Amino acid sequence: MRIVIDARMITEAMHGIARYTYNLADRLTRIDQENEYILLTGGDSLAEFAAGRSNCRLERIGSKFISVAEQVELPRVLRRLKADLFHSPSFIAPLFCPCRLIMTVHDVNHMVFPQYYGRIHQLYYRHIVRPSVQKAQKVLTVSQFSRNEIIKFLGVSPEKMIVTYNGIDSAFKVIDKPGVLEGVRRRYKLPPEFVLYVGNRKPHKNVERLIAAFSKVRTDCSLVLTGAADRQLSGLAADMGLTGRVVFAGAVAEDDLPVLYNLAGLFVFPSLYEGFGLPPLEAMACGTPVVTSNRSSLPEVAGEAAILVDPYSPGELTAAIERVLQDESLYSQMREKGLVQAAKFSWEDTARQTLEVYEEVLKGGGHQL
């Protein structure tokens, strides 16, 4: 069978959905030698990926990710390719799909926090995403929390919803190579001891409250944030008396990210809303204790390995950070529990579960268009 996967979001700077798509395509094309895989791309970022795989090839298309043009081009391309199944690993899918359709919807953040998004996003969810998930044979998502949210906000039949958790790449591990560790420390001008946050700066990520909470922590550590410095957060840090103690690491290369986690004394992720929340697990896999939110999918993913706090309470965040940094016994326990928890999630499992869904749909199971 011919399976087409939309991989246009994969670029050098990989966000969450891009990582999911890359890792899923990588494992699927390794474990499944019976089906043919075609990856839709908008550039050359996957040329090397496909070069050594006889069951995988690329198809370049011109329409941009999230555009009116893709609604015209995607059906035309799928017909020309004679696709048996199209997997949209994001919320983007053609309203009129000429083959069987599977979608992965990671969360409904745009609908839960409409105030953070423009009118175009709202219209897209209402007129493209909602009808598309209704037409799809199966809808995958990455946590039980997201499954319930999608059923609630998008009206998807529970029978169509399947949870396939994200995995963790093998690169995220404990690294005991002083030269490698110090090389990354110098490259990003990192302080000797620091608390780390990895992620974007969208309002629901709650970075402002993190800075406010950190200003009350009794420690000489710094707070390191990935991404470039911005005026708003720099000003907030100055107002909180943290000038010089909030460090902006800039864009961190994929290969350096596991090392960054290893260098951190503690990872803090106080997000208000996550469909899955991969960074806390990546930190755990690197042996770094985690403080994270008690909201959305994060308790489900972190299990008992993290300290969970109310992300709306800077006081709880402050107390949790201090507790981990000051209690050596707790620190060691969290490190060990984190390694065990992270080991429960693998991209191989994600791919095998997804392949089972493909096979069911290709045999005629699931809702029909």
Image (cartoon, helix red, strand yellow):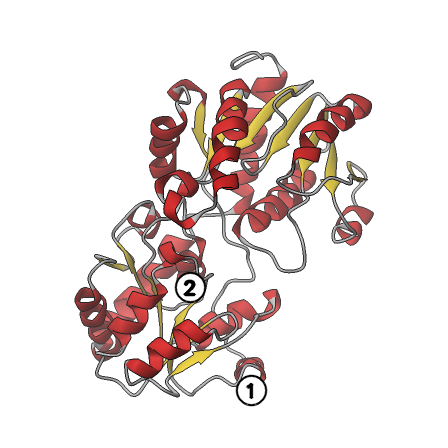
- Say if 369 sits above or below 305 in the image: above
Query: Height in image: 136 above or below 287?
Result: above
Position of residue 269 measured from the top left corner of the image (x, y, whole percent): 35, 62
Task: Kindly identify the amino acid type of the residue bearing the numbered disc 1.
Answer: Arg
Mark 2 lies on residue = 283
Quarter residue 222 falls in: bottom left
Q: Quadrant of residue 292?
A: bottom left
Q: Give the labeled residue for mark 1.
A: 186
Front in this rendered view, residue 305 or 158? 158
Marks 2 and 1 close (CB-CB < 8 Å): no
Q: Position of residue 102 (x, y in %)?
A: 57, 26
Instruction: Report the Cα–Cα distance between label 2 and label 1.
Output: 20 Å
Q: Residue at x 68, y 41 (%)?
A: 30
Task: Give the left or right position of residue 307, taking residue 57 as reference.
Answer: left
Q: How many neighbours does mark 1 have within 10 angstroms: few (below 14), some (14-19), or many (20 or more)?
A: few
User: Which is more foreground, mark 2 or mark 1?
Assistant: 1
